[in-house]
Image: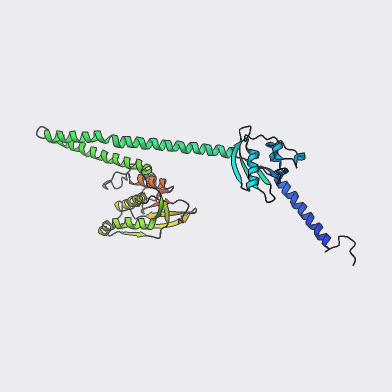
Amino acid sequence: MTDDGNNEPGTPNQDISQKLDEMTQVSHQLSDLLSMADTAMILLDSRLCVVEFNAAAKTLFSILPQDRGRPLEHLAHRLDYSQLHDQIKEVAEQRVAHTCDLLDENGRTHQLKLRPADDGGVAVLLQDITEFALTVAELEKTTADLHRRSKLFQDFAYAVSHDLQAPLRHLMQFTSILAEDHQNEINADAKMTLGHIGTSVQRLQSMLAALLDYSRIESQGNVFAKVDLGEVLTEVGEAFQPRLSDMGGELQIGDLPSMKGDRTQLYRLFWHLIDNAIKYCNGKPLIQISVFKSDLHDHLRFQDNGIGIAERHVENVFKMFRRLEAKPEVEGRGEGLALCQRIAERHNASLWCESDGLNGSAFIMRLPHVRKIT
């Protein structure tokens, strides 16, 4: 067989030709992808001359097919960024990528990405992020407004709960003075009325103290750190053990995860949930605390065997000073579950109640997404 230069099957010439065809096809595919991309892209060589660009680049640069091979800095652009070419040169020299946001002459926002290429050139990418930037700005505005409203609420709650304590103390003092100094001049009905006034003042003072406590959940919380929830609940359980023993009750705690949070506040949250379960028990208290996973989140479940909560009331139990009418003899101010929910919110968690009104209640706390903390 003689080598006459023909591309016979299996010859080196045919293999080279096939590889060239494949490379040409890939090049055309890449060119098609480049032209269809929404992101403006310009590829520069080591001399920072234009090698390739897509259609989107034409909206920001005065660039034509015949501009391939020309330095980019010779082409006009519609960007409000006078340092563009200096920044490109810096990326080419230092081989370090650069990203920033800038505006075009129409006021639209673009994200500029400059990436050093292996051949010494630079890839220039510009993506229109106007809608995204507007959304972020609106979100920041909303967040700032929420913080402002929260601060106003905290200031108002502090003023109401703190500043009103003084006149209430004076009212209590005047009532006591009136009862003591004129005890021989007032009848039994008047004395009973004074007693009711004193009791009401004390209750109002207690409610104002609870409101002040509620307003400080955010402002006076501790810095978040890793918290072993099983360890905290064990401590809470030990605090309730004498009470449970007297009632023949039982607290069962499963294997619980850790999370970042305020240990003191989480202790209070768990304390109130267990305290409620004992207060509203139906016979001997049985409180079961477990964890389950749903929607990639861990959920703590506090199940009790209490009197239950009617479905129409499960939302109301988290409102300040709301109490169950089913057991009016139970002592308390009705702020415990409101504090629990506020603490949960500060920890980016959710807290809700599930009950059919017959077979006890389950308080479920949905923890933040990240479970493993090192």
Res 139 seen here: yes
**Residue 62, image x and y in percent?**
71, 35
| Residue at 43% over, 38% down | 147
Q: Give 212 or 34, whichever is nearer the viewer.
A: 34
Res 187 seen here: no
- Compared to residue 6, the image places residue 163 above or below, namely above
| Residue at 83% over, 60% down | 14
| In this rendering, position of residue 113 left or right of residue 234 | right
**Residue 262, image x and y in percent?**
38, 49
| In this rendering, position of residue 303 left or right of residue 329 | right
**Residue 8, image x and y in percent?**
86, 62
Q: Residue furthest toward the left?
A: 184
| In this rendering, position of residue 273 left or right of residue 127 | left
| In this rendering, position of residue 213 left or right of residue 30 | left
Q: Give 27 or 267, whichever is nearer the viewer.
A: 27
Figure quadrant of residue 322: top left
